[in-house]
Image: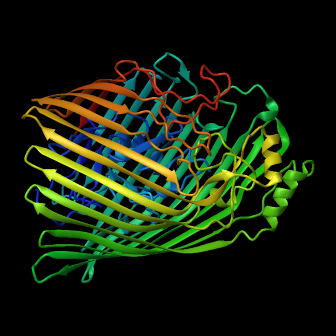
Amino acid sequence: MMNKAVLLPPLLATGLCLLSPPSYGETDEIEHIEVHGQRHVGQWMGEIQAPTPTPDVADWLKAMPGADVNKNGPVSGIAQYRGLYGDRVSVSVAGRPVVGAGPNAMDAPLSYAPAINTEQLQVFRGVAPVSAGMDTLGGAVSSQAYQADFTMGQDLALNGETRAGYQDNGRASDLAGRLHLSSQDHGAVMFVEDLYGRDDQEDGDGRDIQPTEYHKRSGGVDYRYRLAAGYMGGEYQYLDTKDAGTPALPMDIDYIRTHRMALKGGYQTVLGEVTALVGYTDADHVMDNYRLRQNSSPQRYRKTKATSDSVDWQLTLAHELNTEQKQTQTLLFGLDGVISNHDATITNPNNAMFLVENFNDVEDRRFGAFVEWQGSRQGWDWLGGARVKYVEADAGNIYHSAAMMNPNIAGLMQDFNQADKSVDDTLADIAFVTGYQLAPRWRGVVGLGVKQRAAAYQERYLWLPMQSTGGLADGKTYVGDINLDPETAWQIDLGLDYMSDDWFISPRVFYQRIDDYIQGTPVTDDAVLNVAAMMGAEEPLQFSNLDVELYGADLSWYGQLSTAWTIGGQATYIRGKRRDIDDNLYRIAPPNMGVYLQYEISQWQMALHWHGYAAQDDVSATNNEKTTAGYAIVGFELNYQWQSGVEVSAGVENLLDHAYQDHLAGYNRVNGSELALAERLPGAGRTVWLQGHYLF
């Protein structure tokens, strides 16, 4: 069956919308962009073909205007939106924030969203509402999981889905299942998923992209019990990733084992609907540089064990206001927060004396409170809100086994241990988005925002020049700055939407000015320079505050050519520049455009899709970023659905077996492979795939 990116008719520039397709002219919902998982969603306005079956839900972002993915490995994709990524983009999975296990985002947030249990992937277009997450300076992405529900009668209802698939490039298999159980008072959803890439992928020239093998398993359950005017319940998810390559990073995944659990509930009171959630995550992660890649020097073997645990909570009250015009307006009040702890220790299995505490006893505590007002009146609709945030961070003392023999390392260790590592920031976010019905088919949209973000723990507490940078994958070593100032972004988003019975066109232009943007700048400290030189690292960087701007435009569109033929697509242009010097920002998606053509008759569906990227010449000199040439990829998909619920899909991605380099995929960090060291990582060559579903 065909995966689709679904763009709902935009009624505001950003936010959360109901799943049912709204009629044009409704003004009580707000726009978001969705990619639906494995279910056919029917005839929605603005359909775009999502990527071919993939082990990483983050790849679905490529189908969305303004969005893309920084690809460090087959299961390590980092969400990018309008040129911003990492901690700047709020990513929630099943309604909860995600705290990764390690310092290099090998388990990026969307890696915790199994495709079999992902009902939809939402991107909040433009200025994200303050309710979408704690830190939404770079936008917000929400992976919505299937949730337990109830039936009207006493009988037990059972339904679900099973899925099996295979693709030849990398000999990758996909086995998964999801089961829904529901009665009048009880509901449960259970799922399992096993994703196994047995070999390395090949590029369009037939070269192995080493290592790109992986094995990822996950499973979970969501349970709810009906109350008189609400529900209570809990959820649990287990993720086990092992032997997964990340060729853009200095190490690969040995394993990631994560437990995520939560208690939650909702209740209708006289003041409105109250929802509450308390969650806990425990993650254990080991990575190394010798099991999946060649390393001829036993003394350079490195193994990092990273752990994290976190507690998160949410409490909201949605209060409806009935106006004189009998139009409903809603006030949403919320409290939320995340408290996380992080440790990472580097060892050498061939040298019991070698030990480096990369991060030790790091604490990151973030508390938030927000209010939002959503409503409509006389052709206008709006969503406005404000959030206050309080952030505390601290770290313990660190140790390096070479400090006694190396005065530079000893000096850096002493300076860090003697420093006051306790910091705090009080921040505020403001967002306001409004839309106006200009004419029966035309609608204007304006979004304004001021967003702030405190530094991530890697940006503060990376004391030794290393590459533990949240997945930047630029090949540079970095050190942190404990006293970094928070970032402040000033945002504007303008749009004009056209909708008829058969056509939907939605362009946007945007600009944001970010003060105190956190990025690496050349190191001047002699001790850091000497340690970096000893490690063979040239031109180390230090996380610093500087001023930047980003601007651009994106477009989504859709057309119903006939009852059987549809066409649609998206286009994105982003430019990111520093304001203090003449330089560009690092790892910005090139201008790109995607188009699909779909034919559907009876139980058959066919689709042809094309995605082209322009050359990216606007690269960061500070990061020694390399340019990339333009390219285009063509894919084809065929689907047949039986009325019994059985579906079979087959397709080819990169049909022409084109050799290309994805600008967001980073550089080859693997010695002894068929790719040159520091060469831009290529994209996968022709990939033939087959997938079967049974919906019951």
How far across and down, in percent of the image, does residue 294 sit? 69, 25
Residue positioned most to the front: 582
How far across and down, in percent of the image, does residue 296 sit? 76, 25
How far across and down, in percent of the image, does residue 184 sit? 21, 61
| Residue in the image at 47% along x and 50% along y | 576
Q: Is residue 177 above or below residue 311?
A: above
Quarter-wise, where is residue 256 in the image?
top right
Residue positioned most to the top: 206
Q: Is residue 583 above or below residue 536?
A: below
On the question of residue 133 being in view, the answer is no
Task: Specify whether 691 is left or right of 470.
Answer: left
On the question of residue 274 being in view, the answer is yes
Q: How is the image coloured?
A: rainbow
Residue positioned most to the right: 405
| Residue in the image at 58% along x and 39% along y | 625
Looking at the picture, tell me which residue is in the foreground, 309 or 294: 294
| Residue in the image at 31% along x and 64% along y | 447
The quarter of the picture where the N terminus appears is top left
How far across and down, in percent of the image, does residue 280 sit? 51, 62
Q: Is residue 612 above or below residue 437?
A: above
Task: Specify whether 22 is left or right of 529.
Answer: left
Quarter-wise, where is residue 437 in the image?
bottom left
Task: Specify whether 577 is left or right of 300.
Answer: left
The quarter of the picture where the C terminus appears is top left
Looking at the picture, tell me which residue is in the foreground, 611 or 344: 611
Task: Specify whether 272 is left or right of 404.
Answer: left
Number of numbered discs: 0
Looking at the picture, tell me which residue is in the foreground, 117 or 343: 343
